[in-house]
Amino acid sequence: MTQKDNGRGVPPEKLETIARNLAEHLAPGGSIRGLTVAGEVLSNLRSLKGHHRRVARLAAEGKTISGEMEWLLDNWYIAEREGKEAAAAFKGVSRLRREKEGAFLTILARAFVQAAEGTVNPDGIHAFFGGVQQVRALDEREVSLLIPAICGALIFRLEKLAARIDKSPAEGLSDDLGRVFSSLRLLSALDTTDILDEISRTEQTLCHDPAGVYSQMDEKTRARYRERVSLLAKRHGLEEHQVAQRVLELAQTGEGRTRHVGY
């Protein structure tokens, strides 16, 4: 890992360590509906909207508003847009792995945002979720929903921060709000294909295709291969990265066309 700082002095190696320690204490079992996760995001968004309305009312009445209030007033549209998109991504999902307190992916995403102090960037995503993958592998569905999950976690953090505005603004609150809004803005413009491919254990395993064919395929074709691995994993009661590893081992012992992981 590189020695770059992730935002306020949170280096990637620290995020990786936090992620590994967390993953060691999590044991997902059972499932939770995607609609439930979407509902959680929308609930936080509605609460945040209530805070925004109160601030907007104060501004309309000509009252003095704090720097924290200005952040919420000027950037609410970003939270609304990204929150709705995150919820929409989960609505189309039948089931996700569950932990005691909710979706496994949601717990990880919130822990990441908290550990990164609200600052989300590619280095941090790769470090934290790469650390998780070393201990408790995400399945391909979870990897594909990683960015919406992080957006949902940012909305969750933003709602908690906004609630403090209604009480007594604390030192550093304006900076905290700024980091979260900046992270939401970054994720909305970021091409995350390479990041997710690097995080996916299935993708990284299949890229070692002895025939050298897999890594030359376009993303759409590689996605079909990963979907096939997911189906095989469900059929045989295995984790997806275990199936991918077995496929690779078979290809390594093959000859000619059978040296390709897709054979």
Image: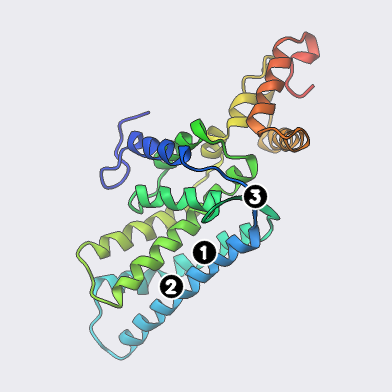
Mark 3 residue element: loop
Residue that appears at 27% across and 77% down: 167
**Location of mark 1 (residue):** 83
Mark 1 residue element: helix
Q: Is residue 8 left or right of residue 163?
A: left
State the separation of the CA atoms marked 3 and 1: 26 Å
Which of label 3 and label 2 is nearer to you?
3
Disc ID at residue 30: 3
Residue 234 lies, in percent from the top left, at: 74, 38
State the separation of the CA atoms marked 3 and 2: 30 Å
Whether the residues at callouts 2 and 1 have beta carbons within 8 Å, the answer is: yes
For this orientation, the residue located farthest to the bottom is 61
Disc ID at residue 57: none
- Disc 1 residue type? Gly
Q: Is residue 53 left or right of residue 86?
A: left
Marked residue nearer the N-terminal end (3 or 2): 3
> Residue 203's image quarter?
top right
Above or below 214: residue 30: below
- Disc 3 residue type? Gly
> Residue 58's image quarter?
bottom left
Q: Is residue 91 left or right of residue 1?
A: right
Disc ID at residue 48: 2
- Disc 2 residue type? Leu
Residue 53 lies, in percent from the top left, at: 41, 82
Figure label count: 3
Q: Please name whichever residue, 258 or 21, is drawn nearer the observer in this view of the structure.
A: 21
Whether the residues at callouts 3 and 1 have beta carbons within 8 Å, the answer is: no
Residue that appears at 19% across and 64% down: 171
